[in-house]
Image (spheres, helix red, strand yellow):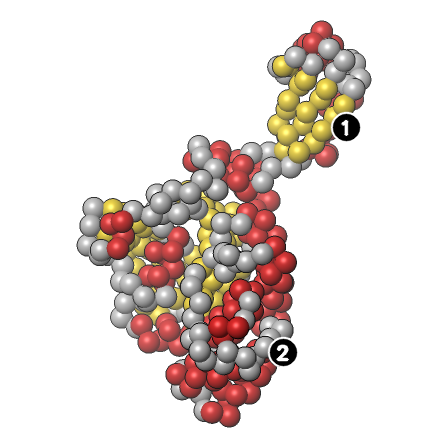
Amino acid sequence: MIETRELTKLFKDVRAVDGINLTVARGELVALLGPNGAGKSTTLRMLTTLIPPTSGSAQVAGFDVVRQQRDVRLRIGYIGQGNGAGHSQRGRDELISQGRAYGMTVRAARTRAAELIDSLGLSDVADRTVSTLSGGQRRRLDIAMGLIHAPELLFLDEPSTGLDPQNRANLQEHIVRLRAEHGTTIVLTTHYLDEADSMAERVIVIDHGRVIADDSPQQLKAKHVGDRVILGFAGSEEAARAAAAIGAQHEGGFIRLTAEDGPREAPKILASLPITPTSIEVTRPTLDDVFLTLTGRSLREDSSTPAAELVEA
C-alpha cells in the first residue's frame, strides 16, 4: 500500500524528512512515533499529496504521489489533527456532502453515511450541528468523513489528541474494529504510547526526519530495552554474595538485571543464587523506554516544530 524511496522534504535549511524508506503492506496497522518536529506529520502530508517531496519518491495504493495525485486521493482517507466538519453544519449533511465530493450519488452517499453513523456510534447525535458535539463525537465524525468513500488506506494524524481517557479508549476500539471488519490499512501518528502498543502490529520510530527503528512493539522492547529483574536482599553483604555467584553488580541490598523475557528467566536466576532474596520484581519495558534508549530522550519531551517548516524551500 505504501512504498517510499529516499523520501525527503526541505523547509529552507531544515530537513524535516531526511531520506525515509518505508514499506507498508495491505491490511497493516502501523504507528509512527516521534517527538514534535521529528517529521511524522510532514511524512503523512507528502503521502497524502498535501505537499510535494523535495526529492525521492513515494507510491500510495500503487500510484505516484506527485504524478498521480487524483488516483491517490480517491483511494485514501486522511484525518488530520484539526476537526474537518463545519461547525454550523449537521453531521449527517457533512458526511453526505463529503461523499458527493468523491462522486457518489446522493442515494449512495446517504446510505454510506447511515452505515458509518451506526458503526461509529453517532446515531443519537448525527442530526445535531457539529458545534454541539463533544470532542470524542467530533473525532468519530472526522473518521466517518475520512471513510465515506470506503478508502483502501486510512491516515490518522494524532487522532486522540485532546480527548479524555474514556473517549480515547472508545476511539481506539472503533479504529481496531474498522480494520478487523473491513481490512482497511491504517497508518497513525500518536504521542500516546499505550495507543501504539495496544493497537499497532508495527511501530516505526522517527527522529530528526529519519527512521531509526521499525518492528513490532514486543520486538522493539525486547531488542532495545529488555525486562528488568530487581532482586532485594536483607543487606549489602548478602547482595554482594549473590551478585558474585551470578557475575552481576549490586547496589546496596539490590541486584538489577536485564533479561529478554523476565518472567521466564527469573526462576532460573533464583535457582542459581546461593541465598534467597527477600523480594523480587519484574518490570516490563514501555515504548517510551525504547525511545529513550534509541535517542537519549523521552518521547514525551515536547520539542517545538521549527518555524522554518512553515515556508517551503
Number of numbered discs overlaid on the protein picture = 2
Quadrant of the rendered image containing residue 115:
bottom right
Residue drawn 54% across the image and 71% down it: 133
**Front-lying residue, 36 or 205:** 36
Query: Residue farthest to the top?
Result: 237
Residue flagged by tag 1: what amino acid is it? Pro
The C terminus, quarter of image:
bottom left
Of circles 2 and 1, which is in front?
Answer: 2
Quadrant of the rendered image containing residue 229:
top right
Residue flagged by tag 2: what amino acid is it? Asp
Q: Is residue 216 visible?
A: no
Q: Which residue is under mark 1? A: 267
Picture coordinates of residue 151, whole percent (x, y): 47, 74
Secondary structure of residue under mark 2: loop
For mark 2, does the 10 Å Cα neighbourhood hold few (<14), some (14 to 19), or many (20 or more) residues?
A: few
Please give left or right for residue 286 compared with residue 300 in the image: right
Please give left or right for residue 296 compared with residue 216 in the image: left
Picture coordinates of residue 198, whole percent (x, y): 61, 52
**Front-lying residue, 26 or 165:** 165
The answer to whether 120 is drawn above or below residue 31 in the figure is below
Picture coordinates of residue 88, whole percent (x, y): 44, 78
Q: Upstream in the sequence, badge 2 or badge 1?
A: 2
User: Alpha carbon of mark 2 to alpha carbon of mark 1: how far?
Assistant: 54 Å
The answer to whether 259 is drawn above or below residue 47 in the figure is above
Q: Tag on residue 124? A: 2
Residue drawn 37% across the image and 73% down it: 73
The N terminus, quarter of image:
bottom left
Secondary structure of residue under mark 1: helix
Residue drawn 49% across the image and 75% down it: 130
